[in-house]
Image (cartoon, grey):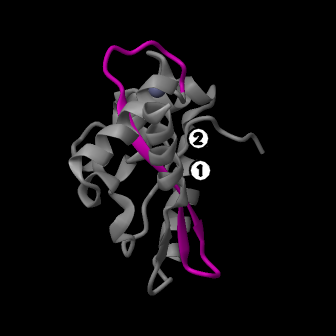
Amino acid sequence: MPEYKLKFEIVPDGCWHSNLRSCLKPKAWDVVRKDAYSRANGRCMICGRKATRLEAHERWSYDEENGVQTLEDVIAICHSCHSVIHIGRTQLMGDEDKAIAHFCKVNKCSFADYIRELGKANEEHRRRNLVSEWSTDMRKLEEILNKERLYHNS
Ligand SMILES: [Zn+2]
């Protein structure tokens, strides 16, 4: 089974903290966002293509057994990759065709692979929604903010 470079990341319904932008002070979010952009160096951190406008994306992992969502990283990616990741929203906006094309191109796979991966992601989403309450591990965020603080103080 190939490990795809570009994957769907469907956030469980009960994960209210998953939108960092809305729960951080604007200044802190700005630091986190810029840290991602500087690491990306003008290229999407998933597909690698050059992009004049990158978007910050929060990556979470989910420990279903213990009900913990952990912030793994904040990365800078292109709009096309972002619309694949948030496929639910993209489908609602009627842009799935573009997302399918991008998914297949980046992952070098077929439409059948796309359908299968989407099915798996939806299944995972249903399962994670069974967790009644998620707690949040944001140590990664502290790490990013501390790194910036150290950098500016030295
Ligand atoms: Zn990309």
Residue topped by disc 1: 116
Q: Which residues are magenta?
A: 47-70
Give the percent coordinates (x, y) of residue 128. 52, 74
Badge 1 vs badge 2, beta-carbon distance below 8 Å? yes
Name the foreground residue: 131 vs 134: 134
Q: Is residue 89 left or right of residue 99?
A: left
Give the percent coordinates (x, y) of residue 146. 49, 47
Judged from this view, the residue extending furthest toward the right is: 1
Neighbour tally class for label 2: few under 14, some 14-19, many 20 plus, Cα within 10 Å? few
Neighbour tally class for label 1: few under 14, some 14-19, many 20 plus, Cα within 10 Å? few
Q: Residue at x 36, y 66 (%)?
A: 17
Residue topped by disc 2: 112
| Vertical placement of residue 11 versus 115, above or below | below
Q: Residue at x 36, y 25 (%)?
A: 54
| Vertical placement of residue 36 versus 133, above or below | above
Residue type at numbered disc 2: Ala
